[in-house]
Amino acid sequence: MFNILVVDDEPLIVKGLSSLLASSGLEIDHIYTANSGFEALDCIRMEDIDLLVTDIQMGAMSGIDLMQHAKLTKPWVQTIVISAHETFQYAQMAVRLGAKDYLIKPLNSEQFLDSVRNVLLKLDKPSPELDTFMSGISESFRLEETQPEYSQLLTELLANPDKVLADPRSLQKIDALNLQGPFFSVIKIKLPLSDPGSEKKYCANDKRLLCYAALNIAKELMDQEWNSIAFYSPEGEITIIIQWDEKSYEESSSGQINRLDVLGRSLHFNIHKYLHLHAVIGISQILKGLPFMNVLNRQASKAILWNKEHSDHYVFYYGDFNWNNYAIDPSAEELHTRSNLIVQKAKEYIDENYAQKGLTIHEVAKKNHVSPNYLSYLFKKNTGFNLWEYVIKLRMEESREMILNTDLRRYEIAERVGYESPEHFSKIFKKYYGISPSELKK
């Protein structure tokens, strides 16, 4: 059963699409609705949404903005875009952000339901039985492998780029792979197939098939919007080299780390979804030039090692750990101190800014110079609160005080605690306290 969120600033359209979905016979568990991007984003943060159906033009936060925030929050949420404008620019941006369809208003009911049905069918989970899954894998993945000679060349490039780049024959092969860059990052995927502490033991054939499947899951994800090469590397890992040309990097240089974070979480999510394995993902920084490939390779490998310290976390970005501040690897005490400091600063920033409209986890993370993924993990681990749950807690406690002790109207209270509409505020308030603001006032 799936959960769908329908978003449009025209209530009649939201009501019509919700009714259409409810009577469609599709395997839908819950249909959520929102009349603005901010309201929809709260729903995505708080609920388990599988499919987002959103309008493009909705005032303060457009459908494109909503898609960007949704992807950063939960990369696996699928999207269908609806629009009154058959504009190539909108459609291009929507597709770049992973939209599965772009439908033009007025909507054809049958076409809309076909689009939703197609997305939900692809979201269906395969059988958890390994043999059953492997027998049907060709229906989901292309089952391609990088040729062994290229895998060996890429492995050598990551280990000793100076030597490889000095060899004319190797340079020809690199040109054939179209490794032009000039900006690069490396991602490593470690599958838990040979861990001594693993409860399940895999035979050699199962390991081969699982690695094969993970490689193709990675390729499917990468081909959507990344210029990349994925291949087997030593120690049973899968390595991905990502590259940007000057133009594509400059277009969003400040957001590339967030995009890598989203990709890392998508890789972990999909490998776990299809293969039932908790893969550990290590992400390097971004550097310019092939001569730095060995540096990027070491960074990605070192990031993976942090799973030993945080065994319940699986996606690690090298830049989160300030390695340059330590002459040697930090002790457990130093790690604990730094983690506490990150959470403390995040709490202080939220305490001062929780009433800000449009506050995002990514803004808080940027102030702490860490990725949103790592901050969210540390915050929950140290405080017991999901970071956004903490924001809502502060907003609800403040609004409760104002309802009980002032004569402010509902829209004024909503405005003061960061909500753009009194209706949205009331919905969150009732979900949090179990009664509406007006009921509490009485």
Image: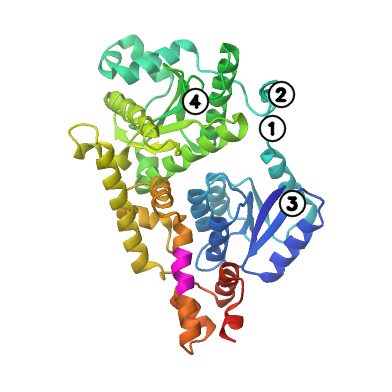
Q: Amino acid at mark 4?
A: Leu
Instruction: Using residue 118 as the reference point, say whether residue 171 is left or right of it.
Output: left
Nearer-N-terminus badge (1/4): 1
Disc 3 secondary structure class: strand
Residue marked by disc 4: 191
Disc 4/disc 2 C-alpha distance (Å): 20 Å
Start and end of the magenta stretch? 391-397
Disc 1 secondary structure class: loop
Q: Amino acid at mark 2?
A: Thr
Q: Marks 2 and 3: in contact by CB < 8 Å?
A: no
Q: Nearer the viewer, residue 136 or 434?
A: 434
Q: Amino acid at mark 3?
A: Ile
Disc 3/disc 2 C-alpha distance (Å): 25 Å
Nearer-N-terminus badge (1/3): 3
Q: Amino acid at mark 1?
A: Pro
Q: Which numbered tag is attached to residue 28?
A: 3
Q: Which numbered tag is attached to residue 196?
A: none
Q: 227 above or below 197?
A: below
Q: Marks 2 and 1: in contact by CB < 8 Å?
A: yes
Residue marked by disc 1: 126
Nearer-N-terminus badge (3/2): 3
Q: Marks 4 and 1: in contact by CB < 8 Å?
A: no
Q: State which quadrant residue 421 falls in.
A: bottom right
Nearer-N-terminus badge (3/4): 3
Q: Nearer the viewer, residue 319 or 229?
A: 319
Residue marked by disc 2: 132
Around disc 3, counting alpha carbons within 10 Å, would you say few (fewer than 14), some (14 to 19), or many (20 or more)? some
How would you classify the magenta stretch by its main secondary structure? helix
Tally the marks.
4
